[in-house]
Image (cartoon, rainbow, N blue to C red):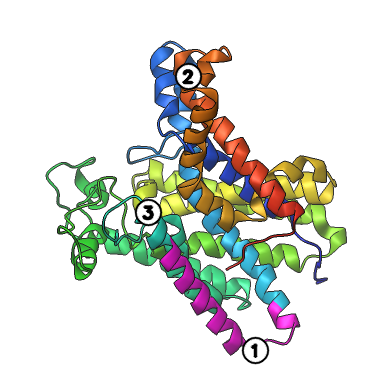
Amino acid sequence: GIEKKQRLLSLDMYRGLVLALLLLEAANYGWQHAIAKAHPGSWLAQMIDYHASHVAWRGCSLWDMIQPSFMFMVGVSMAYSYAKRASLGQSRRMMLRHAIGRALILLLLGLVLRSSYTEHINWTFEDVIQQIALGYVALFLLWNRGWKVQAGAVAGILIGYWLLFGLWPARGTEPWESGWLAHWNKNANPAHYFDVWFLNLFPRHEPFVANNGGYVTLSFISSLATMLFGLMAGEFLRTSSKKASWAVVQKLALWGGIGLALGLLLDLTNICPMVKRIWTPSFALWSGGWCLLILAGLYAMVDLRGNGWIAKPFAVLGMNSIAVYVMVWLVAGWVNEMLKVFFGVGYAASIGFAPEYAKLVENVCSGLVVWAFAWWMYRQKIFVRV
C-alpha cells in the first residue's frame, strides 16, 4: 500500500468533538437533570438527560461513548506515530522504551488528576487516562503484527474476559440482574473483588470497600480490545491507496456495523450484558462499532471531501488533547468562577435564560474560554505531547 504522510484531520476532529462534550460538563455537573426536571413532558429534554449522563448500569448512552472514543483514537494514533518513528530509524526496542515511558507518565497524570480535589492520594485506576496507560504497552507489542494476529488478540481478550465473569460464582445482595446475568452484577463480580484486594495494597486513608459507580481496574483488559480496533483501523487507513479511499470508508463502516450487530446480539440474547462500567465484551463490540462508524463518516467528510473548515474548530482542541483534558479537570471550574466574579453570579439569567438553563450556559461560556486558550496554543504552535 501507499503510506499517507498527511495528518489525519478527521482524527483531530474526532478528538475535538469528544473534548467538546467533556467541556459541556466540566464546570457544572448535572445541568441536564435540571432541564429534564423543568420539562417532564418533553421527549427532547428527557433524551438529552439520558444521553448526557452515564447509564446506571446496563445499556449505552452518548456519554458512555466518550471513554471508548478516546481509547479507540489512541489505537488509530499509534498506527501513525510509531510508523513515523520506524521511518526515522528507531528500533523496536527504542520504541518499546518510549511506550513504557508514555504509559508511566499517563498513569501518573491520571493519579494527579484524580487526587486534585482530595486530601490524600486517590489510588484508583479506572479513569480513561489510567486505563489507556494500563493497556498501552500491550497495544504497542501488537503494533505492526498484522490484522490476523491483532484480530486473534481481540477474540482472545473478549472471550477470556467473558469467561472470567461467567465462571465466577454469582453473588451480591443487591443484584441488578438474576440468574446467568448476575455474574455481571455491580460490585459483585470478579473485577470488583480484585479491586478490594489490589487497591488496599496502596496506602489509604480508609480501606477500599467498593467503587460507588461500579467501575473497576480490570476494565483495561477488555478496553484493550477497543484500542486494538483503533489500531487496526489506523493501520488500514495508513496503508490504503488514495485511489481506494471510498472503498476504505465502506470497509470501516462494514466493520463498524458488524461490531454493532455482535454487541447488540450478545446483549439481547443475555449471553453478555452491555455494561460500560465493567467494559463487558458486548460493550466493547458495540462501542467499537460506533467508533468505526464515526471515524468512517469523519474521514469521508473531512479527509476525502476536503472540508477542513468543518474540522478546524474541533481540531484546535483535538491537536492538544492532553492539555485540553487537563484543563477540563483543573481549569474549567476556575474559569466558571471567574466569569461569575466579572459578570455576576446570575449572568445567565441576565441575558435571558431561564434558571434551568443556567448551568448549561455557564458550561458553554467556560468551555469557550478553554477553547480560546487552545486556539492561542494552536496559533503559537504549542502542542503538549507525552
Badge 2 crowding class, 10 Å Cα cut-off, few under 14, some 14 to 19, many 20 or more, is few
User: Taking 295 as reference, is 71 left or right?
Assistant: left
Q: Give the label on residue 346, or none.
A: 2
Residue 379: give x, y in percent of width and height.
76, 52
Which residue carries the number 1 mark?
Answer: 91
| Disc nearest the viewer among 1 and 3 | 3
Question: Which residue occupies the extreme right position in the image?
Answer: 243
Q: Quadrant of the C terminus?
A: bottom right
Question: What residue is shown at x 65% (from left), y 46% (from top)?
Answer: 373
Q: Residues within 10 Å of mark 1 (few under 14, many from 20)?
A: few
Q: Secondary structure at mark 3?
A: loop
Horizontally, is 117 left or right of 341 in the view?
left
Considering only order in the chain, which callout, 1 or 2, is on the residue closer to the N terminus? 1
> In whole angstroms, how far apart are the C-alphas of marks 1 and 3?
37 Å
**Is residue 82 one of those drawn in magenta?**
no
Q: What amino acid is labelled 3 in the image?
A: Ser
- Please give the name of the residue rendered at 62% of the width and 68% of the height, measured from the top-left corner: 78
Name the residue type under label 1: Ser
Residue to which mark 3 is pinned: 116
Q: Which residues are magenta?
A: 85-109
Q: Please tell me whether residue 339 is drawn above or below residue 231 in the rendered image.
A: above
Q: Residue at x 46, y 49 (%)?
A: 330
Could you say where residue 233 lies in the image, as x and y percent from the top left? 65, 61
